[in-house]
Amino acid sequence: MIARAMKNIVIAEDDSSIAETMAKSLKKLEFNILAVVSTGESAMEKTRELKPDLVIMDVVLEGDIDGIEAGQHIEKELSIPVIYITGFRDKAVLLEEQGKVPLVKPFQINDLTVAIGTVFYQISDKEKRKGQGVTSKISDLLN
Protein backbone atom coordinates (compact mmCIF):
# COMPACT_ATOMS: atom_id res chain seq x y z
CA MET A 1 0.00 0.00 0.00
CA ILE A 2 1.33 3.44 -0.89
CA ALA A 3 1.54 5.92 1.95
CA ARG A 4 -0.31 8.61 0.03
CA ALA A 5 -1.76 10.85 2.74
CA MET A 6 -2.87 13.36 0.14
CA LYS A 7 0.36 13.45 -1.84
CA ASN A 8 0.40 16.47 -4.14
CA ILE A 9 1.07 15.96 -7.85
CA VAL A 10 1.59 18.17 -10.89
CA ILE A 11 0.85 16.56 -14.27
CA ALA A 12 2.65 17.81 -17.40
CA GLU A 13 1.00 16.23 -20.47
CA ASP A 14 0.14 17.91 -23.77
CA ASP A 15 -2.52 15.36 -24.75
CA SER A 16 -5.56 16.68 -22.88
CA SER A 17 -7.44 13.37 -22.91
CA ILE A 18 -4.49 11.52 -21.35
CA ALA A 19 -3.97 14.31 -18.81
CA GLU A 20 -7.66 14.31 -17.87
CA THR A 21 -7.77 10.53 -17.52
CA MET A 22 -4.66 10.51 -15.32
CA ALA A 23 -5.96 13.34 -13.14
CA LYS A 24 -9.37 11.69 -12.62
CA SER A 25 -7.84 8.29 -11.88
CA LEU A 26 -5.30 9.69 -9.43
CA LYS A 27 -7.96 11.74 -7.64
CA LYS A 28 -9.98 8.53 -7.15
CA LEU A 29 -6.86 7.04 -5.56
CA GLU A 30 -6.76 10.00 -3.15
CA PHE A 31 -3.90 11.94 -4.72
CA ASN A 32 -4.24 15.72 -4.84
CA ILE A 33 -3.72 17.07 -8.37
CA LEU A 34 -2.39 20.61 -7.96
CA ALA A 35 -2.13 21.46 -11.67
CA VAL A 36 -2.27 20.00 -15.16
CA VAL A 37 -0.02 21.78 -17.67
CA SER A 38 1.02 21.18 -21.28
CA THR A 39 4.46 22.82 -21.63
CA GLY A 40 7.86 22.33 -20.06
CA GLU A 41 7.96 25.99 -19.10
CA SER A 42 4.63 25.84 -17.26
CA ALA A 43 5.66 22.57 -15.58
CA MET A 44 8.74 24.26 -14.12
CA GLU A 45 6.76 27.37 -13.15
CA LYS A 46 3.90 25.49 -11.45
CA THR A 47 6.30 23.13 -9.70
CA ARG A 48 8.34 26.04 -8.35
CA GLU A 49 5.14 27.79 -7.24
CA LEU A 50 3.16 24.84 -5.82
CA LYS A 51 5.99 22.58 -4.54
CA PRO A 52 4.29 19.21 -5.18
CA ASP A 53 5.55 15.90 -3.84
CA LEU A 54 5.84 14.53 -7.38
CA VAL A 55 5.66 15.58 -11.04
CA ILE A 56 4.37 13.26 -13.77
CA MET A 57 6.02 14.51 -16.96
CA ASP A 58 5.49 13.57 -20.61
CA VAL A 59 8.86 13.77 -22.37
CA VAL A 60 7.32 15.40 -25.47
CA LEU A 61 5.55 18.64 -24.56
CA GLU A 62 4.45 21.80 -26.33
CA GLY A 63 6.79 24.81 -26.17
CA ASP A 64 10.54 25.28 -26.33
CA ILE A 65 11.47 23.11 -23.35
CA ASP A 66 10.78 19.38 -23.60
CA GLY A 67 9.76 17.18 -20.70
CA ILE A 68 13.22 15.73 -20.17
CA GLU A 69 14.85 19.15 -19.84
CA ALA A 70 12.04 20.43 -17.59
CA GLY A 71 12.15 17.27 -15.49
CA GLN A 72 15.91 17.43 -15.03
CA HIS A 73 15.61 21.06 -13.92
CA ILE A 74 12.85 20.16 -11.45
CA GLU A 75 14.82 17.24 -10.02
CA LYS A 76 18.11 19.13 -9.75
CA GLU A 77 17.00 22.63 -8.75
CA LEU A 78 13.85 21.85 -6.74
CA SER A 79 14.66 18.31 -5.50
CA ILE A 80 11.23 17.09 -6.55
CA PRO A 81 10.98 13.61 -8.10
CA VAL A 82 9.68 13.15 -11.64
CA ILE A 83 8.04 10.18 -13.34
CA TYR A 84 8.66 10.42 -17.08
CA ILE A 85 6.05 9.27 -19.60
CA THR A 86 7.00 8.49 -23.17
CA GLY A 87 5.57 6.82 -26.23
CA PHE A 88 9.07 5.71 -27.23
CA ARG A 89 10.51 2.55 -25.69
CA ASP A 90 14.10 3.63 -26.51
CA LYS A 91 13.67 6.87 -24.54
CA ALA A 92 12.30 4.85 -21.62
CA VAL A 93 15.42 2.65 -21.66
CA LEU A 94 17.70 5.71 -21.67
CA LEU A 95 15.76 7.25 -18.79
CA GLU A 96 15.91 4.00 -16.84
CA GLU A 97 19.68 3.84 -17.37
CA GLN A 98 19.89 7.30 -15.79
CA GLY A 99 18.06 6.04 -12.70
CA LYS A 100 14.76 7.68 -13.67
CA VAL A 101 11.30 6.11 -13.39
CA PRO A 102 9.83 5.97 -16.92
CA LEU A 103 6.44 4.73 -18.12
CA VAL A 104 5.80 3.76 -21.73
CA LYS A 105 2.49 4.77 -23.33
CA PRO A 106 -0.02 3.27 -23.46
CA PHE A 107 -0.06 2.29 -19.79
CA GLN A 108 -2.68 1.28 -17.26
CA ILE A 109 -3.40 3.33 -14.15
CA ASN A 110 -2.03 0.40 -12.12
CA ASP A 111 1.34 0.87 -13.88
CA LEU A 112 1.31 4.54 -12.89
CA THR A 113 0.37 3.66 -9.31
CA VAL A 114 3.29 1.23 -9.11
CA ALA A 115 5.66 3.89 -10.50
CA ILE A 116 4.40 6.40 -7.92
CA GLY A 117 4.87 3.84 -5.16
CA THR A 118 8.40 3.15 -6.40
CA VAL A 119 9.32 6.84 -6.31
CA PHE A 120 7.96 7.36 -2.79
CA TYR A 121 9.64 4.15 -1.59
CA GLN A 122 12.98 5.36 -3.02
CA ILE A 123 12.55 8.69 -1.22
CA SER A 124 11.65 6.98 2.06
CA ASP A 125 14.56 4.55 1.75
CA LYS A 126 17.01 7.37 0.96
CA GLU A 127 15.80 9.38 3.97
CA LYS A 128 16.04 6.30 6.19
CA ARG A 129 19.63 5.64 5.07
CA LYS A 130 20.51 9.31 5.56
CA GLY A 131 19.08 9.13 9.10
CA GLN A 132 21.08 5.98 9.83
CA GLY A 133 24.22 7.74 8.64
CA VAL A 134 23.59 10.66 10.99
CA THR A 135 22.86 8.29 13.89
CA SER A 136 26.07 6.39 13.13
CA LYS A 137 28.12 9.61 13.09
CA ILE A 138 26.60 10.77 16.39
CA SER A 139 27.30 7.35 17.90
CA ASP A 140 30.93 7.55 16.70
CA LEU A 141 31.31 11.00 18.26
CA LEU A 142 29.91 9.83 21.59
CA ASN A 143 32.16 6.76 21.79
Image (cartoon, rainbow, N blue to C red):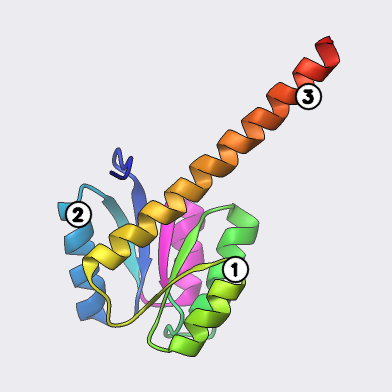
Is residue 52 among the parts visible in the rendering?
no
Which amino acid type corresponds to the residue marked 2 in the rendered image? Lys
Mark closer to the chain start, 2 or 1: 2
**Residue bearing the label numbered 3:** 137
Does the segment drawn in magenta span residue 45? Answer: yes
Q: Position of residue 14 (x, y in %)?
A: 34, 81
Instruction: Please say if the residues under marks 3 and 1 sit with CB atoms less than 8 Å apart.
Output: no
Q: Position of residue 23 (x, y in %)?
A: 23, 63
Identify residue type, mark 1.
Gln
Tell me the residue that label 2 is attached to. 27
Q: Earlier in the sequence, mark 3 or mark 2?
A: 2
**The quadrant where residue 103 appears:** bottom left
Q: Position of residue 56 (x, y in %)?
A: 39, 65
Q: Is residue 136 left or right of residue 59?
A: right
Left or right: where 77 falls relative to 118: right
Instruction: Please report contact status of discs 3 and 2: CB closer than 8 Å, yes or no.
Output: no
Which residues make up the magenta segment?
Answer: 38-57
Few, some or many residues within 10 Å of mark 1 (<14, 14–19, 20+): some
Question: Can you identify the residue that label 1 sits on?
Answer: 72
x, y percent for residue 117: 37, 52
Residue at image point 63% right, 30% down = 131
CA separation in Å, label 3 and label 1: 32 Å
Q: Is residue 129 positioned above or below 101 on the image?
A: above
Q: Is residue 43 above or below residue 85?
A: above
Mark 3 neighbour density, 10 Å: few (under 14) some (14–19) many (20 or more): few
**Residue under the image location 23 percent in, 66 percent down:** 109
Residue at 50%, 89% in the rendered image: 90
What is the three-letter code of the residue carrying label 3?
A: Lys
Which residue is painted at 59% across and 68% down in the image?
A: 72
Residue 104 quadrant: bottom left
